[in-house]
Amino acid sequence: MAGTLQGTPAPALSPSSVKAALPGNYITDFDFLNQYLPDTYEKEFERYGNRTISSFIRMVGAEMPTNSDLIKWAEQGRLHTKYEGCTTSAADGPTGSTSVPYVTAGAACNFRVGQTLFLSLEGGATSNKAIVTAVGADTAVGTADSFEVAYYEAAQSAGFQAGTITAFVYGSEFRQGTNGMVGSLESEDIFLENKPIIIKDKYEVSGSDAAQIGWVEVSTEDGATGYLWYLKSEHETRLRFDDYLEMAMIEGVIAENASGALAQLNGSAYPAGSSIANSAGTQGMFEAIETRGNVWSGGIPSSLADFDSIIERLDKQGAIQENVLFVNRDMSFAIDDMLAAQNSYGANGTSYGLFDNDEEMALNLGFSGFRRGYDFYKSDWKYLNEFSLRGGIDGGKVNGVLVPAGSTNVYDQILGRNAKRPFLHVRYRASETEDRRYKTWITGSVGGARTSDLDAMEVNFLSERALCTMGANNFVIFNG
């Protein structure tokens, strides 16, 4: 009989940290009426394991300095010229005119006289070859987005009277003893930009609490131990800030012109001197992929046919050979099941990944990657599984991202030359006198600080950074 994992009790999601008034945190629950001491465990039990999620950008990218409020870079455009959606009003048949005008759907035409074209009827099986006879004002249409061709086939434009066509240049042809090509083409780059944001956090403890010994021995993921409770809170603030540095680069968005973040607070203008006024945002990885990359929606790709459609899209983009899939648990299992189904014995459960299993061997039910046209490596992304973050949500769910491996050539303004950069990397503000990659400092009069008469220790954190998602056309985001 099949069982069901009950929904109750639900996973705990109550915050473990609280806002507290520091000067009055004195113990008030001593009970001297009870003569028996409880048997206590001094060591704090780590029931959630490693709670941090920051590792993704460190694993796939790099960090490098910048000294500007704006980061700009250029990405290559296509090498060859291709127009889709070209239309014609001339219903030329086999006996029609030998010169047929076309319009490139509003885009200025950069075909040149003498170039040879391949033309394909969109949504049909008809194709033809032609030579460009006129461009722009010299055509019968007379607009900058028009061109005329003469077909090589005697049937002329038979089959092209209705619908739209796709055209691209495959060469040129000129008569003997003639002048060269008229006009030239200038390379066109795509210029992109992003801006860094300032990320802050702070931890504060009073002098009295810093001098108070607890009976619980605390420990944190980065190895801090002791009986001073403020050590735990301070280190957890640091770990939380480390996670924020990564999540801000992943989730960040550019504020739209009419948004309240950019202009208003509670329906009115920000007060003078507000520390959050004109919050313009920064473009994180998710927004960069959804704006300039490839978006899979409507569920999880769970069949070879699904991945074939992804591969077909990658062929149209940069065709990066090696790619990494950072996925949540659902997508990871779906890929494992898809790959296992390719094994002819998979249906009977006799072999699933390992072909020499016996009763003494642990059965490997997962796969680390596969090759189908491209190399795909699979890795679980904790951020997408973490229940207190992206895990367990419905609206705006992300099942995974496909990230190209390797680097690309870009022009670095600081170095003054072309340099190799990972497709995904962080730029932080820095100069010879100021490094804002990861700043931390202590103020107050506690814990060694001697900066003010405040009877407390304030640990401040600050970073100013932006994420550069280069070649976003090679990324894929798998939305829920």
Image (cartoon, rainbow, N blue to C red):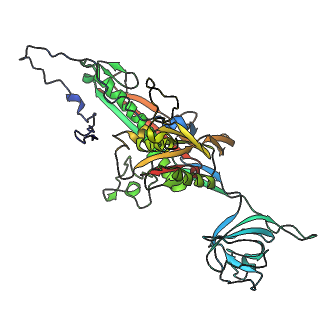
Q: Is residue 235 visible?
A: yes
- Relative depth, front residue between 446 and 149: 149
Does residue 454 show up? no
Location of residue 98 in the rendering, given as x and y in whole percent from the top left corner: 78, 82
Residue 185 left/right relative to 59: right
Q: Hey, which residue is sitting farthest right in the picture?
A: 177
**Residue under the point 47% across and 32% down:** 364
When asked about the image quadrant of residue 202, the answer is: top left
Left or right of 448 in this view: 175: right
Q: Nearer the viewer, residue 313 or 224?
A: 313
Quick one: 40 or 251, which is closer to the camera? 40
Left/right placement of residue 212 relative to residue 115 reads: left
Q: Quick check: 140 above or below 252?
A: below
Which residue occupies the extreme left position in the image? 33
Location of residue 373 in the rendering, given as x and y in whole percent from the top left corner: 62, 47
Q: Residue at x 27, y 38 (%)?
A: 11
What residue sits 33% from the left and 30% below the top?
48
Up-down relation of residue 177 to residue 286 (above or below): below
Please provide percent x and percent y for residue 448. 37, 20
Residue drawn 33% across and 40% down?
Answer: 388
Q: Is residue 205 left or right of residue 79?
A: left
Counting from the top left corner in percent of width and height, residue 43 is at 28, 19
Quadrant holding the N terminus: top left
